[in-house]
Image (cartoon, rainbow, N blue to C red):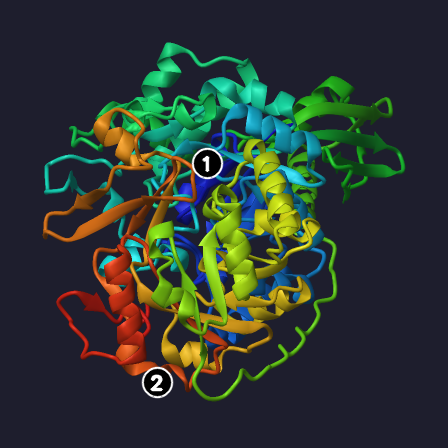
């Protein structure tokens, strides 16, 4: 059966979800979840929430879907233990170090890979399965055929996001909020700058990064037929009335197999951004997917109806089978729930009836009165010896007792021993000045000055190497060359990528730069040494040790970390640091240049977005695809403070060239060799000093 997974940003929203038909809810507790602005749950209210849900046959998935620093691991350990002791049903996780920690402490609790892991291909799902995950939440940008393909080959459960806010960027790959205001989406603090106005080249009152909300209510049967295990509704930061309405509509759509006009109107009333979109799912990725929230007067009738659905009565009832016996030996009542749990309550010895003896029908009528409880009488089997009677109060007492027993039993789960997590091995990095790596985006940036420079590794986009085999042969001869792979590669694009990797291997290229978990297996199968890019979001020592177990040669640490955090990070694999360049703030399925011009010439046309403050954000392509990468306008630069970087134990610092021409490239290389004073007007220190929330 297809699971309906609803959001719970508060206890009230949780009741709204459960009473309107959710099979499971997901919620956050404390600091380690991707919706820090929601009310969320405390350790105490988490216990209450789990009991409330389990009694009603609803599962609870705890979101641990943020990046976690080394210093926060002890606090996270306590939360994992507390949640496991109180029977949460799953952990939703982004950070590789947190995956490892959950498995060590509570191996019996399933781990679900969050959409923040940017899993969008079958090899990515297979890698998650190999790491012990039981479910993966796919990236929201996949179309129906891509989801179908993944489901057909997946060894674990697949979850699909079906309703609510769409991020412009692939989840887990957005750094726009942290770059602008230090509030990281990867840490649950996104300020949603994508919902603000931008213009192309100069500011306009337009919204090229604000997508309409997703709505796949009409495709639930198709998703179930594909083999999707769970459909997720977004909304932990939205009001309980929204949760009630959306959950109710999707419950009815699943049960009835259709979405009526009234149901669509309910969704529209609850929340919309100039309507809804199914563009990613249906493959219609265009400008019609964009919209903004418009202020409208609240619909009092809708609010009242939504509140009534979860405030006044129990709507989602658990069916019970009763067995009531009144005999000369005594009386008792049993209740059995759908999972086979049975409880029994003993009553008083019956009396001889003075007037009318008790009948089976009358006894059944009394037993069936379960109003005001989360239960419904589905069946009553009775046995009454002739001529006996028992008071209505005695029957009521047995019924109350057996239901209380069953409630306590349903709130419990089988106890499992929890383990103490293993100490994370600490590896020291090299001392002294780190080596130099250089990443280019265009062939023009491969200047003679650059090629004459001693580098620990030169990263060149794969499509550039394939387009010019003679040049590639010369670079191989030079040595220390790696092909930079696109961050986003869907399954339909993998044959081209694997063929390209085979050709590069024949040309002598042995190394690749990989920024997505889904590309680790294809790269390894091609016989390549793998260097992890920033897209892997390495934020703690546990994650570094996971990469060691995956046999990566190096890893680029997250540029949302501070220098002290990087210094204290275990160097389980060679650590690399981005030290110069325009930081990639978004990678989008939408081609931003096409959306502006109405035609796809992103391979030749330069473009940028400008916000209200005049800040500019250049746009480039992700590899040779039409996906867009939004860059920070101000360049990160630590060229004048290389001595500080030498104290961090990193293997190399990277110069990342994006929009630079050949002359600008050579100027930066000169500044690396003979640093110029820092220019705060053109450059930034990034997040290495101030960190992120």
Q: Tell me, for residue 140, which label it has, or none.
A: 1
- In the image, residue 309 lies at what x, y percent? 41, 29
Please say if 644 is above or below 555. below
Residue 139: percent from left, percent from top: 49, 40
Circle 2 or circle 1, nearest the eye:
2
Q: Quadrant of the C terminus?
A: bottom left
Residue 265 place in picture, x, y as percent:
32, 17
Residue at x 29% of width, y 82% of height: 641
- Please indicate, yes or no, whether residue 392 appears anywhere in the rendered image: yes
- The correct choice, above or below, for 652 with respect to 661 in the image is below
Left or right relative to 9: residue 391:
right
Instruction: Tell me the SS state at disc 2.
Output: helix
Q: Which residue is mark 2?
A: 644
Asked whether 42 or 132 is in front, the reply is 132
Q: Circle 1: is it few (<14), some (14-19), or many (20+) Cα within 10 Å? A: many
Does residue 359 show up?
no
């Amino acid at each position: 059966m297809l699971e309906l997974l609803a959001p719970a940003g508060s206890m009230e929203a949780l009741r709204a979800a459960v009473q309107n038909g959710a099979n499971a809810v997901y919620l956050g507790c404390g600091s380690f979840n991707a919706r820090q602005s929601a009310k969320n749950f405390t350790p105490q209210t988490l216990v209450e929430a789990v009991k409330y849900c389990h009694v009603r046959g609803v599962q609870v998935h705890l979101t641990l879907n943020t990046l976690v620093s080394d210093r926060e691991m002890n606090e996270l350990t306590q939360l994992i233990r507390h949640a496991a002791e109180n029977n949460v049903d799953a952990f939703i996780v982004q950070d590789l170090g947190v995956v490892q920690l959950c498995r060590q402490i509570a191996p019996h609790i399933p781990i679900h890979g969050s959409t923040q892991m940017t899993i969008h291909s079958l090899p990515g799902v297979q890698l998650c399965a190999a790491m012990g995950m039981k479910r993966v939440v796919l990236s929201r940008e996949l179309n129906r055929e891509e989801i179908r393909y993944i489901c057909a080959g997946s060894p674990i459960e697949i979850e699909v996001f079906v309703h609510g806010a769409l991020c412009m960027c692939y989840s887990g790959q957005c750094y726009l909020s942290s770059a602008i205001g230090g509030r990281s989406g990867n840490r649950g603090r996104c300020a949603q700058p994508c919902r603000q106005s931008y213009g192309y080249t100069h500011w306009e009152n337009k919204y090229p990064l604000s997508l309409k909300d997703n709505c796949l209510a009409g495709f639930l049967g198709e998703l179930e037929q594909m083999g999707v295990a769970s459909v997720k509704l977004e909304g932990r930061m939205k009001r309980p009335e929204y949760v009630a309405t959306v959950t109710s509509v999707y419950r009815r759509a699943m049960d009835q197999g259709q979405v009526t006009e009234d149901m669509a109107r309910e969704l529209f009333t609850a929340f919309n951004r100039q309507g809804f979109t199914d563009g990613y799912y249906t493959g219609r990725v265009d400008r019609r997917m964009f919209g903004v929230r418009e202020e409208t007067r609240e619909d009092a009738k809708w609010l009242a109806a939504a509140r009534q659905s979860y405030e006044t009565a129990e709507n989602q009832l658990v069916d019970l089978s009763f067995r009531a016996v009144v005999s000369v030996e005594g009386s008792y009542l049993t209740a059995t729930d759908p999972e086979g749990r049975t409880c029994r309550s003993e009553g008083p010895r019956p009396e001889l009836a003075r007037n009318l003896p008790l009948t089976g029908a009358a006894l059944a009528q009394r037993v069936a009165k379960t109003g005001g409880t989360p239960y419904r009488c589905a069946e009553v089997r009775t046995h009454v010896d002739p001529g006996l009677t028992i008071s209505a109060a005695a029957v009521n007492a047995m019924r109350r007792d057996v239901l209380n027993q069953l409630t306590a039993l349903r709130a419990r789960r089988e106890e499992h021993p929890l383990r103490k997590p293993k100490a994370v091995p600490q590896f020291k990095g090299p001392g002294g000045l780190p080596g130099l790596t250089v990443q280019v985006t265009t062939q023009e940036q491969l200047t003679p000055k650059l090629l004459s420079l001693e580098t620990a590794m030169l990263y060149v986009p794969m499509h550039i190497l394939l387009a010019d085999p003679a040049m590639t042969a010369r670079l191989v001869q030079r040595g220390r060359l790696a092909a930079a792979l696109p961050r986003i590669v869907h399954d339909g694009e993998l044959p081209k990528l694997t063929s390209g990797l085979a050709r590069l291997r024949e040309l002598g290229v042995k190394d690749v730069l990989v920024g997505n978990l889904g590309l680790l297996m294809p790269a390894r199968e091609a016989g390549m040494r793998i260097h992890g890019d920033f897209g892997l979001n390495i934020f703690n020592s546990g994650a570094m040790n996971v990469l060691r177990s995956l046999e990566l040669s190096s890893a680029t640490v997250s540029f949302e970390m501070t220098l002290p955090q990087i210094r204290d990070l275990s160097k389980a694999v060679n650590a690399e640091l981005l030290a110069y360049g325009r930081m990639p703030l978004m990678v989008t399925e939408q081609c931003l240049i096409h959306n502006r011009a109405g035609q796809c010439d992103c391979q030749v046309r330069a473009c940028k977005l400008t916000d209200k403050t005049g800040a500019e954000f250049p746009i480039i392509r992700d590899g040779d695809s039409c996906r867009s990468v939004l860059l920070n306008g101000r360049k990160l630069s630590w060229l004048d403070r290389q001595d500080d970087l030498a104290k961090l134990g990193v293997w190399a610092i990277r110069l990342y060239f994006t929009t630079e021409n050949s002359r600008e490239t050579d100027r930066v290389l000169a500044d690396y060799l003979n640093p110029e004073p820092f220019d705060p007007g053109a450059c930034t220190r990034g997040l290495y000093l101030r960190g992120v929330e």
